[in-house]
Structures are given as C-alpha cells and as structure tokens.
Image: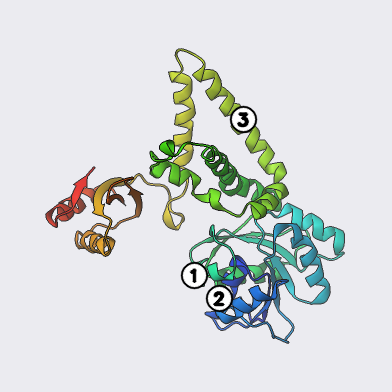
Amino acid sequence: MSGLRGPVRVVGAGLIGTSIGLALARLGVVVELVDANPDNALMAERIGAGSRLVQIEPQLVVVAVPPDHVGAVIAEQLAQTDAVVTDAASVKSKPLTDARLLASDLSRYVGSHPMAGSERNGPLAARADLFDGATWAITPHSSSSPEAVELVRCLAEACGARTVELSVEDHDLAVARVSHLPQLMSSLAAGTLVDAPNSHLQLSGQGVRDVTRIAAGDPGLWTQIVSANSAALTGLLEQIRDELDRVLVALGKEEAGDELTSVLARGVSGAIRVPGKHGTPHIELVSVLVTIPDRPGQLARLFNDAAASGANVEDLRIDHSPGRPVGEVELLVKPGSDDQLTETLTARGWVVHR
C-alpha cells in the first residue's frame, strides 16, 4: 500500500465501488462514499465500506459509475479536487475520449479496470475479497503522470489484485475477447430458450447452464458496455459470423465432417489457452464423478471424504438430475490423484465413476 494514504473518494456505491471501499477498510484507509442514489451510499456505509461525511480532500478518486457517465464524472472530479482520478469502467476508450472533451489537463487521470464482478448488482452484492488474486488492468494514456500511474497501482494492490499495464486500445480489444463477446454469445444462446417448449427444457444439463449463466447480467448495463466497445467487438463479431457461415455451409453438405471438425478443433485450441486458477498455465484435469443425494450435509460429507484422500480438488461442477432426488458432482483433480480419490470415496460409500 506504499504511497496510498487516503482518503479515497469512491463515486458510485454499486458492486465494484462498494467492494473497493470494503477492501480498503480492511487496511484502515479512510473512504468517502458518493452516489447519486443516497440509498446506495447509505447501504454501503452501513456495511462498512466507508463514510458519506468525510470532509478531508481526497488523495485519490475512484469513479465507479455506469459507463455512459464515466467521462463526465472524471472531468468533474479533476475540476473539483487536486486528487489523482481513476475509474473502474470495463471500457477505456470512450471515458478517455469523453473526458478529453470536458477537461484540458488529464495528467492526474489514469484509467483502470478490476477484472472481477458478479451477475448481482448493488452494494449488498459487494465483498471485501472480491479483488483478491484478481487481475487489475491499468491503462495510462499519453499525458498520465508517472506519479498518478503509481498511485493507481497501489490502489489495485491494496485491494488484493495483481496488476497488468496495457494501452487503452489493447485493453479494449482484450476485454472484447474475454468478457464482452462471451456475454453476447451467452445472451444469444439463452435467447433461443425463450420460446422453447417445457419438454425441451426438461432435458437441460450442465452444458446449457454453463453457456447461459452470464446471460443473467443486467441488460441495461451491458447495453452501455457493449455500445462503448463497439469498434473492438465489431471485428470479433465479423470473425464469428464468418465461422457461423462455415458451419451453415458444412451442415448443408452430405459430408460435413471435416469442416465441422476443423471449427470444433479450433475451439479446443482456444479453450486450452485460457489460464488456470491463479493465472497459472492451463493443465488438463481428470474428472471424478460422484453421485450425491440431494439432502442437507451431503456436500460437506463429500468434501471431508475427498480431503481425507489427500487429493487436491482443483475445481468442481455440480449437475442436477431432472426428476431425480440426486445430483452429480464432478471433482477435477490433477492426473495421478484420481486413483487415490476414487479409492477413498468408494471405500466410504460413494457411487463413483469416471
């Protein structure tokens, strides 16, 4: 936290702003909460994210408002204070462009973007540990002062994140790939379910749940985000359109195998490039599937028995069986650990298969 003394003014007491306040409160940093909706600021204050009544000039201002308003609030805070100003918006080009139209000196402004969030919104969804181990992008522009960049880096590290520095343009292309495009694809897939008969939905499994999970995000907020990053997204969507055309042409042929295999294989190649937990390189994990009764205490018992095997569970998924009082837990472990995990769980009465 070297260099970050506070106070820190957080403008926007939603999920991200309140989580920043809670994270800084762990370190005793004074946080001032500002929100156009007084109920949000009051709720954030009540859960310990800061105070609405701080009278001291801030050292740093964090703008965490909806994307359409970020640039104007950046300019406003630069005019009202002598503080360094950053923002938490998921698109960086539009806020910078908007702020340049309203402020003559942007040397105290440095864009940033914590890569953490939730489908839930508002201060009650906030957590002090939301950024622990997360990546926090810092996006200086041509006139950002080195001191301002360093203070924003201190903020990210104080919140528990690891930082990566990117240009504004590179950041927006990166988030288009790893966040905004997946959101659109999830929403498009979920949209096909709106008019589906209930008999079709009864066949739902973990695959459709995985693909459509993030489609539950706030449509109004995502409209602002996607619109603000239209340039980067357009190029990626054109690539997707070309791939869809390949698939449609292939499906119209009697022998579609090679073309479809090529598309699917490219997907596998991309998927294995996604980093593993803690940002480590992707590794192939082995699945151990366990049938679990849908009763209180069963997950706790399973986790205790898995721990007794000595195998470290790297990840897990839960799939519910429609119409049956059981589910299936997929425990993912490193190769070599699956045998001991299977042996221990079987010995303790679990139905295990691979």
Image quadrant for the C terminus?
top left
According to the picture, the residue beneath numbered tag 3 turns out to be 241
Image quadrant for the N terminus?
bottom right
| Residue type at the position of mark 1 | Asp
According to the picture, the residue beneath numbered tag 2 turns out to be 22
Mark 2 and 3 residues: CB-CB less than 8 Å, in contact? no
Single out the residue that lies furthest toward the front: 198
Label 3: which secondary element? helix
Label 1: which secondary element? loop
Of mark 1 and mark 2, the one earlier in the sequence is 2
Measured as percent of width and height from the top left, residue 83 is found at: 75, 75
Of mark 3 and mark 1, the one earlier in the sequence is 1
Left/right of residue 252 with respect to residue 348 in the rendered view: right
Q: Residues within 10 Å of mark 2 (few under 14, many from 20)?
A: many
| Residue type at the position of mark 2 | Leu
Residue at (39%, 40%) from the top-left corner?
202
Q: Vertical placement of 226 versus 17: above or below? A: above
Single out the residue that lies furthest toward the left: 347
Of mark 2 and mark 3, the one earlier in the sequence is 2
